[in-house]
Amino acid sequence: MPREIAFHGVYMPTMTLMFVLAAGLAWGLDRFIASYDGYRFFWHPALLRLCLFICLFGSMALTLYR
């Protein structure tokens, strides 16, 4: 995957695309966990959401920039 992508003539880092993909995936997993009432097992649901996003985004970024 290239390090930059062109979007309507504007060059953006690929990290922008990964950020959007990770946010969408984290949102989907968040809805899945919430639909099965999985947040009742965690102390702080907002921290779980943040950690889920960070882990997804970090793993996607490491696969590209390694």
Image: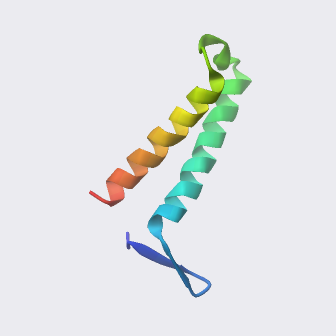
Residue projecting furthest to the bottom: 9
Farthest residue to the top: give it.
41
Residue sitting at x 60%, y 14%: 43
Vertical side of 1 occupied by 32: above or below: above
Name the quadrant containing residue 61.
bottom left
Q: Residue at x 51, y 33 (%)?
A: 51
> Which sits in the foreground, 65 or 36?
65
Q: What is the residue that sits farthest to the left in this orientation? A: 66
Give residue 28's position: percent from left, percent from top: 65, 40
Q: Which is more toward the observer, 12 or 60?
A: 12
- The image position of residue 20, as x and y in percent, is 59, 57
Find residue 48 and report its horizontal and vertical position in percent.
Answer: 57, 27
Question: Is 2 situated above or below 8?
Answer: above
- Look at the image and name its color scheme: rainbow
Residue 64 picture location, percent across and down? 34, 59
Tell me the quarter of the image containing the N terminus: bottom left
Work out whether residue 36 or residue 26 is closer to the camera in this orientation and state it. Answer: 26
Q: Residue at x 31, y 60 (%)?
A: 65
